[in-house]
Image: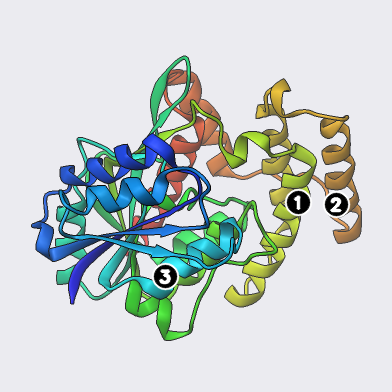
Amino acid sequence: MKKLTVAIPTFNGGQNLERAIKSCERIQILPDDYEILVIDNCSTDDSISNVNKLKKEFGNLRLVENQNNVGRIQNWNVSIDNAQGKFLIFLFSNDEINEENNIHECIKTLDNDESISIGFASLLKKEIEQSFLKKSFATDMIKCKSKCFTKECLNRGLLPFGPIQSIIYRVQDINKDHNRFHEKMPINADEIFTYREVIKREKILFTPKPQITWDLTQGRFHGKMKIEDEFKEHSETIKIISKFLNIKVNFGLVATYRAINLLKFTTGNLKSNGKKVATKHLLSKMKQSGTFFNTDKILVKTFLNKIKNSGKDVDDILYGMIISDCQKLD
């Protein structure tokens, strides 16, 4: 069995697809020990011919061609169905394996510690005007209790696991209960899927080194997302996850964090009175649950830390505090 599958689900990837494939050379694992798996979703450009040409250069490159365009989310599932590695990483055609990645170290740690469910890395978010680290929750490679982290995140309505390119999954765990991405939840399919994987083992592995460069300069799905759709699907996502985790969520606390998140959205996301629709949806959910805005120590500490460290991402501060609190329980 291969040690790793790098799955690249693609549609009309063009030259970006070639860049993504070639970036896999930055993974410090012998080519014979991992595969680059391209799942083509009926591209109409020269993606397939380009991949076939690259096979001469990359002996570990494998191409699967869908007979019909199965859609974006289902193509991720086809990637799982065809993965031959022990571990799985997703890489989309717009992205690259980052030069600073420590994928080999994460896989070695996962291989040696069966109590770890997933490897969770930071990523370099590349926008037109700037690039910056996201998901940088720790300064060193650390482990955290899965149940504690998921419970503390869910109780605040937090969805920390997307995008999926940040995660190293265990293929055996995915297939054990045939976990697959939820096609009817296009915004948060990755979060629901990963929450399910995380709780299958005792710990999560966090690493501060970026696994991928997440390139948003050419437009992505999330760039087209409407804020009102995000808020509606978020409510359904929390409902689904809390049900299989068997956790009763404090919606007053969730409402506080969601209200703050609403303020963070830029005007570019606000189409057709989206902010008003999202606010109305949030207030409606509060009325249904009979709750009002609540707060907690972590939220207060996060804002105080943000004031001291204005250059640091507020989400990274928040998740870092949750991890720190969970480690104190070990």
Image quarter (top left, top right, bottom left or bottom right) of the C terminus: bottom left
- Residue receiving disc 1: 252
Q: Residue at x 62, y 34 (%)?
A: 223
The amino acid type found where label 3 is placed reads Ile
The amino acid type found where label 2 is placed reads Met
- Residue receiving disc 2: 286
- Residue receiving disc 3: 80
Is residue 272 depicted above or below 8 in this figure?
Answer: above
Labels in figure, total: 3
Q: Residues within 10 Å of mark 3 (few under 14, many from 20)?
A: many
User: How far from the left and from the top, in percent, is residue 49?
Assistant: 35, 49
Asked whether residue 136 appears in the rendered view, the answer is no
Q: Is residue 287 left or right of residue 115?
A: right
The amino acid type found where label 1 is placed reads Gly
**Rounded to the nearest whole Å, what is the CA distance between mark 3 and mark 2?**
38 Å
Colour pattern of the rendering: rainbow
Q: Residues within 10 Å of mark 2 (few under 14, many from 20)?
A: some
Pointers 2 and 1 in contact (CB under 8 A)? yes
Q: Residues within 10 Å of mark 1 (few under 14, many from 20)?
A: many
User: How far from the left and from the top, in percent, is residue 274?
Assistant: 83, 33
Q: Is residue 143 left or right of residue 25?
A: right
* Label 2: element kind: helix
Q: Is residue 14 left or right of residue 210?
A: right
The label on residue 289 is none
Of residue 91 and residue 12, the one placed in the foreground of this image is 12
Q: Quadrant of residue 186?
A: bottom right
Is residue 38 depicted above or below 310 in this figure?
Answer: below
Q: Residue at x 30, y 37 (%)?
A: 19
Pointers 1 and 3 in contact (CB under 8 A)? no
Is residue 272 depicted above or below 240 in this figure?
Answer: above
Among numbered discs 1 and 3, the one appearing first in the sequence: 3
* Label 3: element kind: helix
